[in-house]
Image: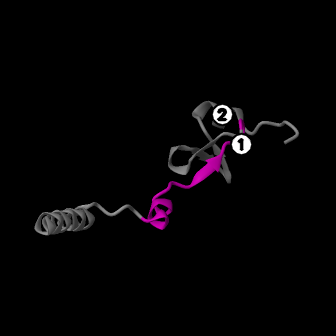
Amino acid sequence: MFRLLLWIAIIAAAIWLWRRFTRAKAPNPDQQNASAAPMVRCEHCGIHVPRDHAFAKDQQWFCSQSHLEQGPHSSGR
């Protein structure tokens, strides 16, 4: 009976070690943030869009061509 328990323990340890070393490592939270695109705020509607999808005019950013043409929204924000 002792030999059977010993073999079960050895096999369980081997499976645990194999899974531990073959499992893909999770990315670091720092690496995830490094790949995040910078966001800018639309001057017309206030929505945030990735900077590479936004339209720029002078130092102002817009979410679409139509908002770029309309210019900044003149509300009391």
Q: Is residue 40 magenta?
A: yes
For image coordinates 63% across by 50% down, the residue present is 40
Taking depth in this image into account, of 42 and 23 the one nearest to the observer is 23
Residue 29 against residue 73 in the figure, above or below: below
- Quarter of the picture containing the N terminus is bottom left
In x, y percent, where is residue 48? 63, 44
Bounds of the magenta span? 28-45
Label 2 neighbourhood size at 10 Å, few (<14), some (14-19), many (20+)?
Answer: some
In x, y percent, where is residue 42? 67, 42
Q: Which residue is mark 1?
A: 43
> Which of the numbered marks, if any, corresponds to residue 51?
none
Label 1 neighbourhood size at 10 Å, few (<14), some (14-19), many (20+)?
Answer: some
In x, y percent, where is residue 33? 50, 61
- Quarter of the picture containing the C terminus is top right
Q: Is residue 47 magenta?
A: no
Q: Which residue is mark 2?
A: 67
User: Do the residues bearing badges 1 and 2 touch, measured as CB atoms within 8 Å?
Assistant: yes
How many discs appear?
2
Q: Quadrant of residue 68?
A: top right
> Circle 1 — which element?
loop
For image coordinates 27% across by 65% down, the residue present is 20
Q: Amino acid at mark 2?
A: His
In x, y percent, where is residue 63? 60, 39
Taking depth in this image into account, of 48 and 68 the one nearest to the observer is 48
Q: Amino acid at mark 1?
A: Glu
Left or right? Give the position of 54 relative to 9: right
Q: Residue furthest front?
A: 1
> Circle 2 — which element?
helix
